[in-house]
Image (tube, rainbow, N blue to C red):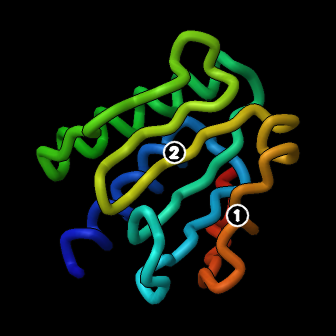
């Protein structure tokens, strides 16, 4: 459990470093059929910022924990980038895509934690 919390913390730090907004951590650990243990969801203001956020997460996790994602999808258009760290999946959206998919609410039983924006 400690390692996963460290990974979530590193992901949050990477997102905050590039001014990611409206970060939400969905704790799925108590949901038996969940695809992972945590979702970390974030908004970037533009495709360029979404790409920068994903790069920052990758660098922060690699430098701090030697953790690399199993897969990264969406970097070509950078309106929704998903980074799969096995037990943690990171979703970085532009605002309209985040609103449309509304993935924080896919798992009704998940405990959601809102991370304060850094201004």
Element type where label 1 sits in the image: helix
> Residue extending furthest left?
66
Could you say which is closer to the camera, residue 36 or residue 43? 36
> Residue extending furthest front?
33
Residue 5 appears left or right of 92: left
| The quadrant where residue 113 appears | bottom right
Q: What residue is pinned by disc 1? A: 104
Image coordinates of residue 82 in percent, x first then y, are: 50, 38
Label 1 or label 2, whichever lies nearer to me, is 1
Are there few (<14), some (14-19), or many (20+) residues within 10 Å of tag 2? many
Image coordinates of residue 90 in percent, x first then y, are: 48, 48
Of the residues under marks 1 and 2, which one precedes in the sequence?
Answer: 2
Q: What residue is pinned by disc 2? A: 15
Please tell me whether residue 78 is drawn above or below residue 106 in the rendered image.
above
Are there few (<14), some (14-19), or many (20+) residues within 10 Å of tag 1? some
Residue depicted at 33% across the width and 33% down the height: 71
Could you say which is closer to the camera, residue 119 or residue 13? 13
Residue 9 appears left or right of 44: left
Image coordinates of residue 79 in percent, x first then y, are: 69, 24
């Amino acid at each position: 459990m400690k390692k996963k919390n460290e990974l979530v913390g590193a992901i949050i730090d990477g997102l905050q470093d590039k001014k990611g907004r409206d970060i939400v951590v969905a704790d799925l650990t108590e949901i038996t059929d969940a695809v992972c243990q945590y979702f970390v969801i974030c908004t970037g203001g533009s495709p360029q910022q979404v790409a920068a956020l994903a790069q920052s997460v990758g660098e922060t996790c690699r430098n701090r924990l030697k953790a690399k994602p199993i897969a990264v999808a969406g970097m070509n258009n950078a309106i929704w980038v998903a980074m799969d760290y096995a037990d943690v999946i990171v979703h970085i959206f532009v605002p309209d895509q985040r609103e449309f998919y509304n993935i924080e609410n896919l798992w009704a039983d998940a405990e959601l934690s809102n991370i304060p924006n850094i201004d």
